[in-house]
Image (cartoon, rainbow, N blue to C red):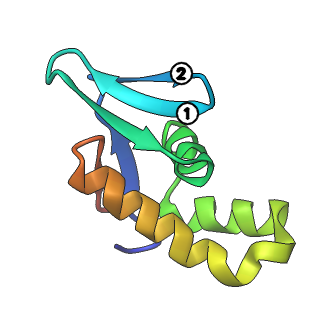
Amino acid sequence: MLDTDRPSLNPDFTAEQFDEEMLLYSLAENRAVYLNDSAYLVWQLCGEGLPIGEMIAMLEQTYPERRETIRGDVLAALDTLRRSGVLTLVAA
């Protein structure tokens, strides 16, 4: 994954909150993907059309106390979402 890659959301997936959990589900594929709070935030940022590097920079500015772990957390969330079919990465 490069900082210039842009995540593109799979439009088949919709977010839904059930009790305290966030799920992305696809009626077309008849499946759901559970998201923790961090992964849900990353998913939301993917909808903004930002490249990965800008997403990371924005989160580092918003959460400076977590600066050391944000890059790894974002990349891990993106990888999980990509492997789950929730998004694809578009090279710049």
The image position of residue 39, as x and y in percent, is: 52, 51
The image position of residue 16, as x and y in percent, is: 49, 20
User: Residue placed at 71% from the left, 61% from the top?
Assistant: 59
Q: Residues within 10 Å of mark 1 (few under 14, many from 20)?
A: few
Residue 51's place in the image compared with 29, above or below, is below
> Do callouts 1 and 2 mark residues in contact (Cβ within 8 Å)?
yes
Q: Which mark is residue 74?
A: none
Left or right: residue 34 versus residue 45 is: left
Left or right: residue 17 versus residue 3 is: right
SS assignment at label 1 = strand
Residue 21's place in the image compared with 69, above or below, is above
For marks 1 and 2, give the CA distance: 5 Å
Looking at this rendering, what residue extends furthest in the bottom direction? 68
SS assignment at label 2 = strand
User: Residue placed at 62% from the left, 47% from the top?
Assistant: 37
Kindly identify which residue carries mark 1. Answer: 21
43 and 3: which one is in front? 43
User: Residue placed at 54% from the left, 48% from the top?
Assistant: 36
Left or right: residue 3 versus residue 44 is: left
Q: Amino acid at mark 2?
A: Phe
User: Residue placed at 82% from the left, 60% from the top?
Assistant: 62
Q: Amino acid at mark 1?
A: Glu
The image position of residue 5, as x and y in percent, is: 38, 63
Q: Quadrant of residue 63?
A: bottom right
Looking at this rendering, what residue extends furthest in the front direction? 19
Q: Can residue 4 be spotted in the picture?
A: no
Kindly identify which residue carries mark 2. Answer: 18
Question: Which quarter of the rendering shows the C terminus?
Answer: bottom left
Left or right: residue 15 versus residue 62 is: left
